[in-house]
Image (cartoon, rainbow, N blue to C red):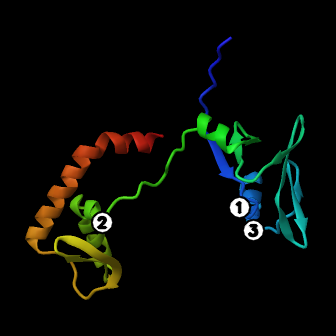
């Protein structure tokens, strides 16, 4: 029989043996982030020796018993339940949904977003400054500034760039907003 796995969103964290606090918070659904980390909860056990974790000693409590989570295994939360998954199997089953996609300062500037953000920052006497050498951005940093606003040519160019960016990306932005 051929079966297809139901597509379901899942949260996951990789066990390194050194990330006990992060794993504790994940396994307690981030409800105990300000509390002392206990070695045992309803759904897991982290072996502690002298207040530290023995590398690799994470056990998930499941309906079928305790399951050892090995170093580099993933702990997956799917439909409210936690389970262990080897790194190999994890890569075969799950697609990582990246929440952050790094872009260049050049792309940020060309989209008009640097200008837009600086219009807002100018209100407070701040700006994101970029240094350009030979048409290449060599440095970027926040700075206090004494000027406010831009000249009319910069304003016109900024609005055109922002409008172009929105026109080219509106479908993707709408899709992301509705996910």
In this view, the residue farthest toward the left is 153
Residue found 71% across the figure and 58% down from its top:
16
Tell whether label 2 touches label 3 (CB within 8 Å).
no
The image shows residue 25 at horizontal and vertical percentages of 73, 59
Q: Which residue is mark 1?
A: 22
Whether residue 48 is visible: yes
Give me the C-alpha separation between circle 2 and circle 1. 31 Å
> Which is nearer the eye, 179 or 40?
40
Q: Secondary structure at mark 1?
A: helix
Q: Earlier in the sequence, mark 3 or mark 1?
A: 1
Q: Which label number is shown at residue 105?
A: 2
Q: Is residue 75 left or right of residue 142?
A: right
Q: Secondary structure at mark 2?
A: helix
Image quarter where the N terminus lies is: top right
Give me the C-alpha separation between circle 3 and circle 2. 36 Å
Q: Which label number is shown at residue 111?
A: none
> Which is nearer the eye, 106 or 37?
106
The image shows residue 63 at horizontal and vertical percentages of 88, 35
Mark 3 or 1: in front is 1
Q: Which residue is mark 3?
A: 34
Q: Earlier in the sequence, mark 3 or mark 2?
A: 3
The image shows residue 111 at horizontal and vertical percentages of 24, 58
Q: Earlier in the sequence, mark 2 or mark 1?
A: 1
């Amino acid at each position: 029989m051929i079966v297809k796995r139901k597509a379901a969103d899942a949260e996951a964290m990789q066990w390194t043996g050194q990330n006990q606090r992060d794993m504790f918070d994940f396994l307690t659904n981030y409800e105990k982030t300000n509390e002392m980390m206990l070695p045992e909860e309803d759904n897991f056990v982290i072996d502690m020796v002298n207040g530290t974790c023995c590398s690799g000693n994470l056990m998930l409590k499941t309906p079928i018993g305790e399951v050892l989570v090995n170093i580099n295994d993933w702990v997956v939360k799917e439909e409210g339940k936690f389970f262990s998954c080897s790194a190999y199997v994890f890569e075969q089953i799950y697609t990582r949904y990246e929440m952050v996609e790094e872009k260049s300062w050049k792309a940020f500037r060309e989209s008009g977003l640097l200008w837009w953000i600086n219009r807002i920052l100018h209100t407070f006497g701040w700006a994101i400054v970029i240094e350009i050498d030979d048409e290449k951005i060599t440095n970027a940093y926040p700075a206090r500034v004494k000027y406010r606003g831009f000249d009319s040519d910069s304003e016109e160019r900024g609005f055109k760039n922002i409008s172009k960016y929105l026109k080219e990306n509106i479908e993707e932005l709408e899709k992301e907003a509705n996910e």
